[in-house]
């Protein structure tokens, strides 16, 4: 089972904090890979919140092709961090030319674009770069979105962090999600590595998604190009989140009703029974059935955790005003926020969605049996 | 027959018959029960003459010839009275003195069963034991990658939807705009398929209805039953139990006068309306109720004269094209119940099924599609239709489901599969395989008759006399002397047994696959088969 750790902090912190938690939870993952998402960035990126940031891994040839491609589109580099790796290879970490984190100036003609058009164009560019990279095996791209950095690589998380120099001062964020990979189901493929990102939404999950194929079939037939990839059965959790909130207009309190709807007896006495039975029927193909703990972020920088219908996975949320962390195990939380009031730790149960909003003042619990904000 | 007489071409010996009655004179008590119960009078009590000789090696000794007689059972060999293998004789024999045996050689009666130019007609099944569904295995077991679920103790929701489900976005839009949203029923995925009142005996029908009512009201299992084309008893139409019933309309419109007139008096809407365009057992052929079974009651419910055969036309005569058929009829039926009742067509599996499906996807009023495969049963059909016409269900369901995925409507039009599901007794495994290939639910007919009423039919051309009303178990007979053999209470109890045990088996299949909160429709990654070509055709894994 993969180990997950996420934090949301008033002050930007180094990703090393999350990696430390992964290291503490190392018993639970085989160190076969790490995925990292940084959002609500600090440091130099603080000043360029609107600039889309491209995160990925490139060969020398790939970076040349990328530059040509981006210039053709009218993107100019605004700021970049190149993670240059040590010359001496480290066992278990593949040799790469360049880990790229590059913020771009938007082309001038994009100024008049609506938010949706902008999102769809940025996502289109990411998919195009991915496609180009897959052709020649010279580019891997994880995200292309404002205020967002993603790093993924094969190898032990702590060794990787040292290898990539992730403790550098330019890398600071208020939202950090990290996953230590337990590679069981699929061959190691960086596109199969959590967290997954789509247009400002990101999730990471542990556990197998047994309903993967019907969900994938449903998403890929929605006519939305970004609903693609699926090297991992967990990628669909991010896309369902996007679909629920963007396409259906639900709030985060509705997400759990899509993936793990209430059963008939609870549904019939719910204050929004009528609406929810419609939602359950129409989103039947999006019901997840596996044992899964999902941690995710929203474009407004809220952080949330939901559990599967049977609550078969561990997950704990705790912290103090200004700093909260979501962890798949308590020892991870202890390592990062030892001075919190542990009696206020929350382990979300099968009906709960736990949310820490961007003000980072408290942990809100939304139970599935409560009334929800209807998008009507 | 004497050896010096001329032989008729159709003169048969026991050796030519499909079923041979094995009889032990030593054990027979001559009680006569077997001859009385035989539905086709294949056996009769006869006096046999036997000559015994007593000879001696001594030349002087007297040679004695005795002519004895004894009584015993004689099997008739003419086509009309050929044994059908039902084994009712064995069932009633107190001494195990008699049983039919399948002729291990060639059944030559086949060449003579068209006496007076009438080809063989029969009820029952295709009589082909092979089943691709039986060969499908569930190979994706969650064990250490994730804890498998507990079929006995975890919560499950094995329900399906019957009705047109809009896309999430469209549904949301109509909720917002307070537009019309098609009716959808949440039902149990195993449905008792269309078997008419007329094809089935009153006791059988009553038993099924009671069983279904019990399952709904006591077991919390929303099981539904389709009427078939034969109308519906007036009391049921006006009762609260109508909500458990899918009313079928077919090309003969039998019973629909009564139904239409009952609409203002209905306390509940029916579960759904099934428009039958085709049947897997005899695709392209209409329903048939032979005159033997059209008694006073059946005639009254169907609104026809007594004692006449009722062949429904092969297609709905008021329409001339698929667009007409589907669009107009679905709309008319929807309108009759104020657009509150799902209406869907049932067709026989065919390589043209996709065309029908594509047509339905563009029609908001179409609530689903039931597809009946070649192994479907029938109360009466020409043998040639049953044996040689039709399309296997597995690939037809798969093609249709994959087509829905292609256009993104896989959750919108539920496909129901029927025809030979559980024909070798593996109901839950066959049903689960079809669900994972893309079916939203399963219709069964013959299985219910076998499990709930003891139908003796097998895939070896056994019995198959449903068409002429002499069903030895009273399941498809309209003769009170025969159907009183069947107690409706017993049928109801067995219907409940069947569904409850099916439910356990279904959970035993889906739980190890890590599924419990929704029916695993289209979960094809769980399936494997030991045949490359079949795996390729069905887009599932090849496993050996």
Image: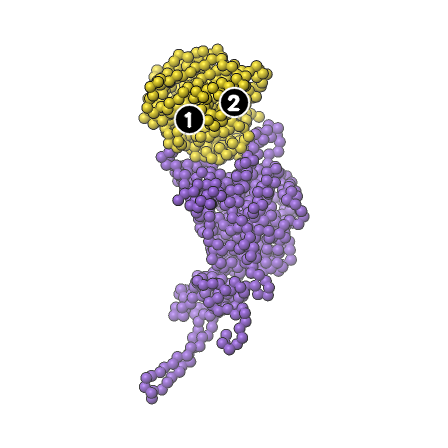
Chain colours: A yellow, B purple
Decide if residue B497 is on the left or right side of residue B112: left
Q: Nearer the viewer, residue B338 or B60?
A: B60
Residue A147: x percent and y percent?
A: 48, 16
Residue A125: which disc?
2
Question: Secondary structure under badge 1?
Answer: helix
Decide if residue A94 is on the left or right side of residue A213: left
Please name the residue shown 40% across and 81% down the image: B66
Residue B264: x percent and y percent?
A: 64, 43
Residue B486 higher or lower than A61, as above or below: below
Residue B449: x percent and y percent?
A: 49, 53
Residue B374 higher or lower than A31, as above or below: below
Of label 1 and label 2, which has the lower sequence position? 2
Residue B334: x percent and y percent?
A: 63, 41
Q: Nearer the viewer, residue B44 or A291?
A: A291
Please name the residue shown 49% across and 38% down the image: B522
Which residue was labeled with disc 1?
Answer: A190
Question: Secondary structure under badge 2?
Answer: helix
Asked which quadrant contains residue A92, the reply is top left
Please name the residue shown 50% across and 74% down the image: B1
Decide if residue B96 is on the left or right side of residue B267: left
């Amino acid at each position: 089972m993969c180990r997950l750790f996420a934090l949301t902090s008033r002050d930007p912190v180094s990703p090393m904090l999350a990696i430390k938690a992964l290291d503490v939870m190392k018993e639970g993952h085989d160190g076969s890979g790490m995925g990292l998402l940084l959002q609500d960035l600090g440091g130099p990126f603080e000043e360029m919140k609107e600039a889309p940031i491209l995160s990925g891994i490139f060969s020398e040839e790939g970076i040349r092709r990328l530059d040509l491609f981006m210039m053709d589109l009218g993107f100019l580099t605004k700021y970049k961090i190149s993670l240059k790796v040590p010359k001496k290879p480290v066992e278990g970490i593949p040799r790469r030319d360049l880990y790229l984190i590059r913020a771009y100036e938007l082309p001038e003609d994009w100024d008049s674009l609506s938010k949706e058009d902008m999102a769809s164009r940025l996502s289109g560019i990411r998919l195009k770069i991915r496609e180009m990279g897959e052709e020649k095996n010279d580019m891997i791209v994880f995200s292309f979105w404002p205020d967002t950095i993603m790093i993924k690589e094969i190898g032990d998380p702590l060794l990787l962090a040292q290898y990539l120099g992730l403790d550098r001062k330019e890398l600071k964020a208020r939202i950090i999600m990290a996953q230590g990979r337990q590679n069981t189901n699929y061959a190691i493929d960086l596109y199969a590595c959590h967290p997954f990102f789509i247009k400002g939404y990101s999730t990471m999950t542990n556990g197998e998604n047994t309903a993967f194929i019907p969900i994938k079939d449903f998403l890929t037939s929605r006519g939305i190009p970004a609903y693609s990839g699926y090297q991992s059965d967990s990628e669909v959790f991010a896309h369902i989140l996007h679909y629920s909130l963007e396409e259906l207009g639900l709030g985060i309190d509705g997400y759990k009703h899509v993936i793990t709807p209430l059963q008939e007896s609870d549904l019939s006495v719910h204050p929004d029974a009528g609406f929810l039975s419609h939602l359950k029927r129409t989103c039947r193909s999006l019901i997840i059935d596996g044992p899964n703990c999902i941690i995710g972020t929203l474009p407004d920088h809220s952080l949330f955790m939901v559990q599967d219908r049977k609550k078969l996975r561990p997950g704990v949320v705790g912290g103090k005003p200004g700093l909260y962390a979501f962890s798949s195990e308590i020892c991870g939380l202890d390592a990062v926020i030892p001075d919190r009031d542990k009696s206020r730790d929350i382990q979300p149960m099968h009906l709960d969605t736990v949310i820490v909003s961007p003000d980072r003042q408290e942990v809100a619990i939304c139970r599935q049996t409560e009334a929800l904000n209807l998008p009507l | 027959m004497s050896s010096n007489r001329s032989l008729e071409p159709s003169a048969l010996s026991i050796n030519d018959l499909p079923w041979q009655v094995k009889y032990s004179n030593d054990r027979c008590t001559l009680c006569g029960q077997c001859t009385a119960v035989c539905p086709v009078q294949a056996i009769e009590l006869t006096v046999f003459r036997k000559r015994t000789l007593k000879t001696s090696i001594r030349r002087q000794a007297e040679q004695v010839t005795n002519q004895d007689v004894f009584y015993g059972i004689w099997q008739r060999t003419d086509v009309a009275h050929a044994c059908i293998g039902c084994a009712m004789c064995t069932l009633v024999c107190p001494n195990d003195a008699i049983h039919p045996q399948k002729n291990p050689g060639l059944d030559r009666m086949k060449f003579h069963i068209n006496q007076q130019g009438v080809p063989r007609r029969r009820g029952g099944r295709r009589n082909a034991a092979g089943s691709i569904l039986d060969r499908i295995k569930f190979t994706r077991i969650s064990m250490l990658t994730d804890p498998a679920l507990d079929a006995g103790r975890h919560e499950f929701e094995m329900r399906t939807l019957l009705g047109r489900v809009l896309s999430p976005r469209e549904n949301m839009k109509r909720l917002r705009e307070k537009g019309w949203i098609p009716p959808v029923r949440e039902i149990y995925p195993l449905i008792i398929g269309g078997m008419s009142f007329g094809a089935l005996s009153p006791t059988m029908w009553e038993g099924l209805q009671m069983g279904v009512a019990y399952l709904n009201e006591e077991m919390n299992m929303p099981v539904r039953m389709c009427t078939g084309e034969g109308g519906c008893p007036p009391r049921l139409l006006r009762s609260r139990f109508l909500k458990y019933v899918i009313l079928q309309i077919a090309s003969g419109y039998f019973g629909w006068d009564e139904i239409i007139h009952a609409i203002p008096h209905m306390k509940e809407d029916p579960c759904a309306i099934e428009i039958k365009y085709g049947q897997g057992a005899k695709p392209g052929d209409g329903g048939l109720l032979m005159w033997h079974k059209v008694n006073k009651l059946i005639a009254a419910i169907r609104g026809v004269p007594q004692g006449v055969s009722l062949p429904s036309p092969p297609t709905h005569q008021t329409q001339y094209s698929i667009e007409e058929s589907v669009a107009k009829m679905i709309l008319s039926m929807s309108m009759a119940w104020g657009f509150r009742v799902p209406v869907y067509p049932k067709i026989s599996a065919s390589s043209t099924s996709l065309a029908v499906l594509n047509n339905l996807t563009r029609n908001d009023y179409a609530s689903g599609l039931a597809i009946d495969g070649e192994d479907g049963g029938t109360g009466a059909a020409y043998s040639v239709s049953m044996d040689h016409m039709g399309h296997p269900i597995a690939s037809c369901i798969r093609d249709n489901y994959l087509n829905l995925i292609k256009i993104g409507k896989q959750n919108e039009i539920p496909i129901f599969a029927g025809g030979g599901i559980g024909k070798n007794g593996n109901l839950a495994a066959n049903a689960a395989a079809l669900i994972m290939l893309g079916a939203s639910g399963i219709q069964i007919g013959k299985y219910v008759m076998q499990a709930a009423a003891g139908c003796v039919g097998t895939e070896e051309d056994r019995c198959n006399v449903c068409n002429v009303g002499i069903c030895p178990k009273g399941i498809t007979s309209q003769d009170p002397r025969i159907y009183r053999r069947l107690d409706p209470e017993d049928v109801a109890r067995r219907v409940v047994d069947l569904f409850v045990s099916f439910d356990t088996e279904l959970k035993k299949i889906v739980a190890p696959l890590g599924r419990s909160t929704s029916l695993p429709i289209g979960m094809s990654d769980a399936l494997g088969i030991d045949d490359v070509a079949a795996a390729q055709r069905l887009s599932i894994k090849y496993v050996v």
